[in-house]
Image (tube, rainbow, N blue to C red):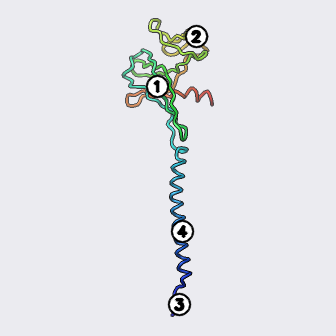
Amino acid sequence: MSDEAPRPDSAKSLLTWATAGLASLASLVLGGSTLTYLLSPLWQKQDEGWVDVGRADAFKPDQPSKVEFVQRQRDSWSVTEKRSSAWVVVEEGKHVKVFDPRCPHLGCPYRWDVVSTKFKCPCHNASFSMDGDVLGGPAPHALDQLPSKVESGDIFIQPDAKAKAEKS
Ligand code: FES
């Protein structure tokens, strides 16, 4: 049997290493949490740009309505707001069509003419049916339709879908 008492240097060294180990572990946990918090916007699921433009039953059937709304776009750490608009047509009270508010000729804003029941662009006199088809003037194609869906009675649209399609 050994009568040797533990050497003070050895106990002190063990305590130093244990303290350093605990401090390192604490740093890792706190640093990891902070890093996770700071980088979380990079992997947060982005909404797909759907904007709620109102109750479907609030729109008059077969009567185009211009809706104005604010889009909030999250870009990692910042959120920007952009005012925009679209034309909504609820056909027979069920089928929803949403049109980009810019004329496909040169981008002027067009309007719905109640008397002639046509969309009319004042810039170069293009006209379109309620379905968006070209009826006259220089427009090269029908009105651009935006993706839409109805959920829980609300109409949602994707105003940037056209812009994204043009970029890709
Ligand atoms: S921009 Fe609409 S007709 Fe030219």
If you read the primary sequence from the N terminus, does the residue marked by circle 3 or circle 2 appear first? 3
Q: Which residue is mark 3?
A: 4
Image x and y of residue 40, in percent: 52, 47
Q: Which residue is mark 4?
A: 21
The quadrant of the rendered image in which ligand 1 is seen is top right
If you read the primary sequence from the N terminus, does the residue marked by circle 1 or circle 4 appear first? 4
**Residue at image location 54% in from the left, 78% down from the top:** 12
Between the residue at mark 4 and the residue at mark 2, the CA separation in whole angstroms equals 74 Å
Q: Secondary structure at mark 3?
A: loop
If you read the primary sequence from the N terminus, does the residue marked by circle 3 or circle 4 appear first? 3
> Contact (CB < 8 A) between labels 4 and 2?
no
Image x and y of residue 41, in percent: 53, 44
Between the residue at mark 1 and the residue at mark 4, the CA separation in whole angstroms equals 55 Å
* Badge 1 residue CB within 8 Å of ligand 1: no
Q: Which residue is mark 1?
A: 69
> Contact (CB < 8 A) between labels 2 and 1?
no
Image x and y of residue 3, in percent: 51, 92
Q: Which residue is mark 2?
A: 123
